[in-house]
Amino acid sequence: MDFIDQSTAFLSSPIFEWIIKGALIYLGLLWFSVVLWVTRDVINRSNNVLFQTMVILTNIALPVFGLVLYMIIRPTKTLTEKYYEELEYNFLNEHEHEESCGRCEKKVKSDFLFCPHCEEKLKEVCWSCKHTYLDEYAVCPYCGKKEKSATRKPQAEQKKKQSKKTKK
């Protein structure tokens, strides 16, 4: 009976009351910090006011369950991360459709038929299938048809004349 008397005496002592009060204060601070963290996190991850309010109220009312539930359903990225990811995506897509002119080496859009800087012909339009293809190809890579010889010969002759004039 000595053990039971000592346990009863300890439970009714002021030291045990201080331990209980300290534990309750610790749990209260922990609960407050979880609510504060969830509030800041949900504001950084969502613009939906209803979602933010529901998450905060759930964590106030049900601290442990609310935190676990929020960790499951919270958005994976913050609004800032989404913004910079979209900027990067737009930047890469904008520069993906550019290539260099073979003559002046300046950047031109991939759908240009002529270089706007040096007037070099970059691509041909197929007379058969109407696709554009590089000027260097002998046949259309889409349908396999050769370019009409009537349009090809005068261009070739003009290039030869220009190259002879530049050599003189």
Image (spheres, rainbow, N blue to C red):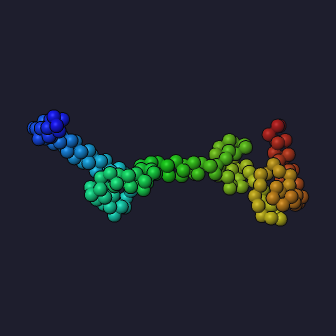
Of the 4 image quadrants, the one containing the C terminus is top right
Q: Of all residues shown, which one is farthest toward the left?
A: 14
Give the position of the N terminus as an image quadrant: top left
Q: Is residue 79 above or below residue 9?
A: below
**x, y percent for residue 118:** 69, 47
Q: Residue at x 18, y 35 (%)?
A: 3
Rendering coords of residue 85 (x, y %): 49, 49
Front-most of 163 and 105? 105
Residue 71 appears left or right of 115: left
Instruction: Give how far across and how far down residue 48 sits, in percent.
Output: 37, 61
Q: Residue at x 82, y 55 (%)?
A: 141
Tell which of 62 and 155 is nearer to you: 62
Q: Residue furthest front?
A: 1
Q: Nearer the viewer, residue 91 or 24?
A: 24
The x and y percentages for residue 166 are 80, 40
- The residue located at (69%, 42%) in the rendering is 104
Residue 58 relative to residue 6: left or right? right
63 and 132: which one is in front?
63
Image height of 159 relative to 126, above or below = above
To which quarter of the image does residue 150 belong?
bottom right
Decide if residue 162 is in sight here: yes
Taking 128 as reference, is 158 above or below it? above
Residue located 38% across and 52% down the image: 68
